[in-house]
Amino acid sequence: MDSLRNSLRRLNPLSETATEQSQGTQTQGSLAGRLRDSDFVESMPFWLPPTLLVLLFVYGAIAWNIAISFTGWSGLGQPEYTDLSLEMYRQLPADQDFRASLWNTILLLITFTGSSLVVGLGLALLVDRKIRFENAFRTIYLLPMALSFVVTAIFWSWMYASNGVINTTLNVFGLDLLAHNWIGNPQFKLAAVIVALIWQFSGYCMIVYLAGLRAIPDEHYEAARIDGASTLKLYWRVIIPQLRSSTIGAVVVLMVFALKAFDFIYVMFGTNPGRSVDILAVTMYREAFSSSQWAYGAAIAVVLFALALTIIGPYAYTQYKRGAL
């Protein structure tokens, strides 16, 4: 039979070729059909347009900003990409405004984040004690976070005014010596901003910590009490160490919001708030739009972007290693 089949193939090679081509066409057709009917292709209308928009307006804008920072563009005409240099970055260390804004940004990050965590943890521990009207308290504490930076800045500007609520309350209780021009005195400007931001975001920290506290099994509390641990040792050695993941997540969110405090300072103090409260975002805006130094403003934006990556990068990497991303 094999010899007969081979003889037929030799007699009719065109038929064999046609058969192979037909099989190949069917295979290609089936592959094209499977690809056309796959979830990847069917879902393209949903994910492809937003992906292209993000690539263009987010990552494209970041790449363009980095490219501008290597030029000397002042915002007029077209930037020259033929003569790139690090001149704008060399000017940063010698710029007193930049150094002051960088220091204020770091101080804002550390002070605001640490204080918000402490206040939020304290509120969470109080609410976790099964108090009455718990839902009402959680809503009251979390409500400020629903406000924008613009609304919060206007609200606290009224509070900090010479005849505002803070000074009026101090005068009522006979504490006139403690009354100050809170947002007019350079010594209190940054502290005033930090207090307002703590008020706005401590409720968020409370919710994060409260969720972490409710996730701790009751057996841990019972075991600590059986071992004779006091209430202070119970929370310090047993409960708070188990809130590590909640703390890390809250720290990242708070620091990102601190870097975005441009709206708050701009509404309260304008584009030139003074070195005592200036931050990188405000300095970047002033250099680019007020002074028409776009390349220098782009360099400051790159520093701000690098600072944001320093905060978000390690957290994203650890979450990826844990399989959470």
Image: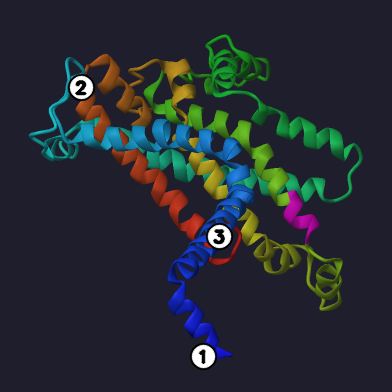
Give the spatial CA distance, label 3 vs label 2. Answer: 39 Å
Residue 264 appears left or right of 141: left
Main SS category, magenta section: helix
Q: Answer with the quarter of the image where residue 69 lies.
A: top left
**Pointer 2 residue:** 293
The percent position of residue 142, horizontal first and vertical second, equals: 72, 34
Is residue 103 shown to the viewer in this render? yes
Question: Which of marks 2 and 3 precedes in the sequence?
Answer: 2
Mark 2 is on which residue type? Answer: Gln
Question: Which of marks 3 and 1 precedes in the sequence?
Answer: 1
**Pointer 3 residue:** 319
The C terminus sits in image quarter: bottom right
Mark 3 is on which residue type? Answer: Gln
Does the magenta segment cover residue 214? yes
Front residue of this view, candidates 297 and 139: 297
> Do the residues bearing badges 3 and 2 touch, measured as CB atoms within 8 Å?
no
For the magenta stretch, what is the residue range? 210-215
Residue 48 appears left or right of 228: left
Mark 1 is on which residue type? Answer: Ser
**Pointer 1 residue:** 3
The percent position of residue 277, horizontal first and vertical second, equals: 38, 28
At 78% from the left edge and 63% from the top edge, which residue is drawn? Answer: 216
- Mark sitting on residue 252: none
Position of residue 304 relative to residue 179, above or below, is below
Is residue 279 shown to the viewer in this render? no
> Do the residues bearing badges 1 and 3 touch, measured as CB atoms within 8 Å?
no
Residue 81 appears left or right of 123: left
| Camera-nearest label, 2 or 1 | 1
